[in-house]
Image (cartoon, helix red, strand yellow):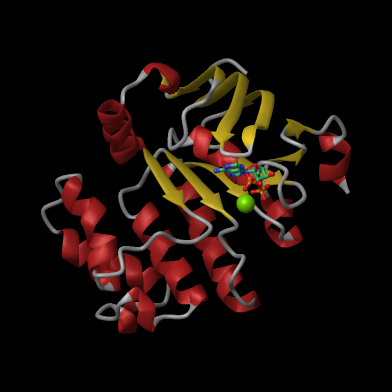
Amino acid sequence: MTNPILSLQDAALSLDGNAGRVDILHGITLDVAPGETLGLVGPSGSGKSSLLMLMGGLEQATGGTITALGRDLTTMDEDALARFRRDHMGVVFQSFHLIPTMTALENVATPLELAGEADAFARAEAELEAVGLAHRAGHYPSQMSGGEQQRVALARASAPRPDILLADEPTGNLDASNGDAIIDLLFGLRDRHGATLVLVTHSQTLARRCDRVIRLRDGRIAPDAARDAAE
Ligand SMILES: Nc1ncnc2c1ncn2[C@@H]1O[C@H](COP(=O)(O)OP(=O)(O)O)[C@@H](O)[C@H]1O
Ligand SMILES: [Mg+2]
């Protein structure tokens, strides 16, 4: 790959807990091309969420290097990483991480305001409409279902038009029709804005639409990923 937008070289993650050291990811080497959609699959506990956190600079690698848009995330300090994420990345967490004291509209408008958008609230309204939640703009996360919170989280992550969107099981809490709407929204971001997508998913439907699927097992890329992806 000539110019990957995201490149991991032998990336590793180990965490020290009170039960000792846990090795979570081992020697992950992987390039993602600009505009590519990469699916991450694998059993629960295989390291998919952890890998997404490394790619987003939300967890520091304990080994190897991670480069995004040509910048080495492993040597940036917290402030530089926060700015880099604000300017280039969108993340949809498995547990949404919406701000509980803010309405849906405020949750979506906040990153737009931070990015200096003049019409942040009007834009946020349009983004909520795109996920079918215009009528819930004034509601707080606790007043919404898991699926609705997930759609707000996706609106928030995609509103600033990130170069790279990382999403952890973006259709995991949704029924088929809402899931399809979210898939269309994700791919619209790619097709209309050239975003690169990395999607953790258990959904066959979503995995099939990815350009490439990588399977994790015990914190490593499984060698049979290509064959599994073709199934
Ligand atoms: N903060 C943590 N401390 C210790 N172990 C963790 C921590 N976070 C995740 N793990 C472990 O790392 C492994 C991978 O977790 P995760 O990335 O969440 O997997 P997946 O998303 O594929 O289900 C699991 O064995 C999990 O228990
Ligand atoms: Mg996970």
Percent x, y of residue 65: 53, 17
32 shown above or below 93:
above
Q: What residue is drawn where x is 73% and y is 52%?
A: 44
**Quarter, ligand 1:** top right
Residue lying furthest left in this view?
118
138 shown above or below 150:
below
Instruction: Work out whether residue 223 or residue 123 is closer to the camera in this orientation and state it.
Output: 223
Percent x, y of residue 117: 16, 50
Res 220 → quadrant? top right
Q: Is residue 14 left or right of residue 54?
A: right
Res 127 → quadrant? bottom left
Q: What residue is drawn where x is 57% and y is 28%?
A: 33
Instruction: Work out whether residue 108 or residue 189 is closer to the camera in this orientation and state it.
Output: 108
Q: What residue is drawn where x is 39% and y is 67%?
A: 152
190 shown above or below 21:
below
Numbered disc total: 0
